[in-house]
Image (cartoon, rainbow, N blue to C red):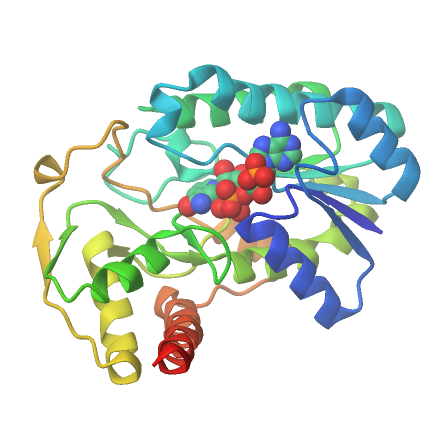
Amino acid sequence: MIVVFGGNGQLGQELTRAAASRVITLQALTHAEADITDSAAVAVALARWKPDLVVNAAAYTKVDLAESNVADARRINETGPAVLACVCASAGIPMVHVSTDYVFDGTKESAYCERDPVCPINAYGRTKAAGEDAVRRILKRHVIVRTAWVYSEFGQNFLKTILRLAATGDELRIVADQYGSPTSAREIAEAILHIAPLLLRDQGLAGTYHFTADGVTTWHGFASRVVAIAAPITGLNPLVIPIQTARYPTAAKRPANSCLDCRLFVQTFGFSLRYWSEGVDATTRVLAASSQRATSHVA
Ligand SMILES: NC(=O)c1ccc[n+]([C@@H]2O[C@H](COP(=O)([O-])OP(=O)(O)OC[C@H]3O[C@@H](n4cnc5c(N)ncnc54)[C@H](OP(=O)(O)O)[C@@H]3O)[C@@H](O)[C@H]2O)c1
């Protein structure tokens, strides 16, 4: 039995879907059902479900808002994982905790590996780095999976924003000097369920790993792909114009290089990465088709 905290998020919902197709027993708890900052609530949940493994998919993920809501971001991204780690440690349960490329400053010329020192440049990244530290300090049997540029059919994400903006028919101006690997929450869920039995068998696998899709693009490359795949379905084909980060000011600074070197994950767990556009194409087709059905229904 696996218990997931943050069950209503992109990753939480994909974990539920992936478990159903693999016949794995998994209980995903929403924020309302279990608040990760409330140790009593976490203890009650673990006593009730008696999991072999906990997955923390809960987080404060509003990167720009975190700049002004540091206390909330810290509570959810630092205190929450610390609470989960404490309760898991007392109950003897291992935990997979999910983290981010935003723990790095993005100045490295090549992909970041697990041993590169963290150096976050925004509040979200600082709280996520502190959450990682807490998990490492408190719970020996942990795996931290850092990922990046997450999208899915569920929740809010860049891919959905592009489809929404494309529907307005206007030109899209998208940042073309930040590099990363768009990663499907579905793939992350598959990867976590793949490693779960291995972690339970071998405590020596504890540690920090990078996991994203294969290949690299920019936000502009990502958006262009979404528009190209959606166009034949929606009939909308706006121009996607590349711009520099300086032309799109945001509250939080973003790393210019978000690429994560995932070789350790692939070699350790024998899980192969899919090229980033495969997942983007599949998710775009599903979302574009469902928006077309909704539009034709209204018409
Ligand atoms: N999204 C990305 O691009 C990205 C990139 C790199 C890494 N990551 C990491 O990947 C993981 C999953 O991200 P995601 O995109 O699936 O996030 P998400 O869609 O924003 O979901 C986060 C979930 O956490 C829940 N939550 C918030 N506070 C909570 C609390 N105190 N107790 C319990 N649940 C709480 C939220 O519920 P409510 O909405 O009801 O509060 C939400 O369902 C996170 O660790 C994130 O940092 C994400």
Quarter of the image where one finds residue 269: bottom right
Q: Residue at x 28, y 68 (%)?
A: 226
Residue at image coords 57%, 25%? 76
State whether residue 29 is above or below residue 233.
above
From the viewer's perspective, tell me whether residue 257 is left or right of residue 35. left
Q: Is residue 149 left or right of residue 45?
A: left
| The C terminus: image quadrant | bottom left
Image location of residue 142, percent across then percent down:
70, 34
Residue at 54% across, 26% down: 77
Residue positioned most to the top? 71
Q: Is residue 213 above or below residue 133?
A: below
Going 58% across and 62% down the picture, which residue do you hit?
Answer: 271
Image: 38 above or below 51: above
| Number of numbered discs visible in the structure rendering | 0
Q: In the rendering, at what x and y percent does residue 274 appear?
A: 45, 67
| 270 versus 198 height, above or below | below
On the question of residue 95 being in view, the answer is: yes
Residue 129 in percent (x, y) is at: 48, 24
Residue 84 located left or right of residue 128: right
Q: Quadrant of residue 94?
A: top right
Report the front residue among 11 and 256: 11
